[in-house]
Amino acid sequence: MKIKYYTQHDSKIGRWAGSKRLKSIKKMGAVLNQYVPLFFNRFSAAFNPAHRPIFESCWVYLAILLAFKLFASYQDEELARLWSAIGDMNHPTLEEYRLIDQYLGTGERKYLDLLRYADPPCPARLKRIIDLKLTGPDNGLPIYEKYAFNIEGSSMDRCIVLYGSSNGIYPKKARKLLAEIENSGYSGHVLLRIGGFPNTQFGGLEICHVPYSFKVAFLQEARLLGFKQVLWIDLAIHPLCGFETVFSEIERRGHFFTTVGSLQDNFPTHLPKAAEALNITQDLYVDIPHISSSMIGLNMEDSRAIQLLETWYNETGNLYSSMTWWPEELSLSVSAWRLGCEPLTWFGNLVCAESEQFQLETRPNVQFYLDGLR
């Protein structure tokens, strides 16, 4: 049974979460932010061999989670002018979304010079970064929808998150994947965004200028909404069966992702400035698995998974760690490696190309196919 139990434009969804209670917690978080530096968790992996969150079981930690308001380390005059023009960062209006689109598409964005003049260049990736649109279809309000499919027992805590920019083919791809998930027999919730930016009602808009930051932002949003097993899936990934195996691994291991080799195998797409920001040197590339961000599953009851999400989010906010051709994957890979979160398997063991589906009889572990539409 399908239940579509909430559909709302993004400018209003924040009000659903913006109760007096949450507002008071946010005020508490603002005070705590004066005393708890945001970079604290960034280095916690190096000084915390037990891999436990620093504030686990502490009311301060819980307050920070609920208040969750990360400020990107990077700032410049152009970005400051943009944020000053937004009346309420948690509830932007349509006109304010259009201002953000103008900045993303035609703004100077000096930090992107690291990609514009990168060696090696990658024009196709740069174009996709610049083409991100936060307004919804037809330049209107963003779309935010929630679905519940075949809910029973523990599946009440499951959530798949789907995000697509409103331009190009992405709205159609999002709708297609949503239908495929329903038809797969999946049991759990789905959050769907077309346009807008994930986690906006909890302050996430402040990292929207960082390339591919919508992935970590959507995982964080699902966590703050109370879901326990959360799966990000790219719109290019299509299920060939159900999701039971994936969610079983998320629950058992605490995390679910695959590898596409080591960082060394994908060198030189990892640009020097990003590696420097992450405090890694090239001699470590061979030891660090390159994690594919096509599917990322986290168990939000697992302390190490939570620490991974927090660390990855903080690194994303620092911006320079994302100035590379696989921006979300480099920071995710390094954060996971430092915390000892190992990939489940090689990407190709679970995913085949769309043209390889005839091989399924000889590749019994394949559960998804990857399309070539971007």
Image (cartoon, grey):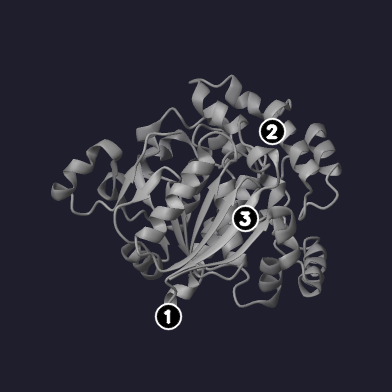
From the image, tell me which residue sits under label 3: 144
Question: How crowded is the residue under tag 1: few (<14 C-alpha within 10 Å), some, or many (20+)?
Answer: few
In x, y percent, where is residue 16? 72, 67
In x, y percent, where is residue 238? 36, 48
Mark 2 or mark 1: which is in front? 1
Amino acid type, callout 3: Tyr
- Of 203 and 169, which appears nearest the observer? 169
Amino acid type, callout 2: Leu
Q: Residue at x 55, y 22 (%)?
A: 118
Amino acid type, callout 1: Gly
Q: Residue at x 78, y 50 (%)?
A: 92
Q: CA distance from mark 2 to mark 1?
A: 43 Å
On screen, residue 36 versus residue 303, left or right, reads: right
Question: How crowded is the residue under tag 2: few (<14 C-alpha within 10 Å), some, or many (20+)?
Answer: many
**SS for tag 3?**
strand
From the image, tell me which residue sits under label 2: 104
Mark 1 near mark 3, Cβ–Cβ under 8 Å? Answer: no
Q: CA distance from mark 3 to mark 2?
A: 21 Å
On screen, residue 184 versus residue 137, left or right, reads: left
From the image, tell me which residue sits under label 1: 153
- Of 178 and 85, which appears nearest the observer? 178
Question: How crowded is the residue under tag 3: few (<14 C-alpha within 10 Å), some, or many (20+)?
Answer: many
Among numbered discs 1 and 3, the one appearing first in the sequence: 3
- Of 219 and 8, which appears nearest the observer? 8
Q: Quadrant of residue 287?
A: top left
Q: Quadrant of residue 192?
A: bottom right
**SS for tag 2?**
helix
Q: How many marks?
A: 3
Is residue 56 shown above or below 7?
Answer: below
| Residue 56 visible (yes or no) | yes
In x, y percent, where is residue 282? 45, 34
Is residue 56 shown above or below 44?
Answer: below
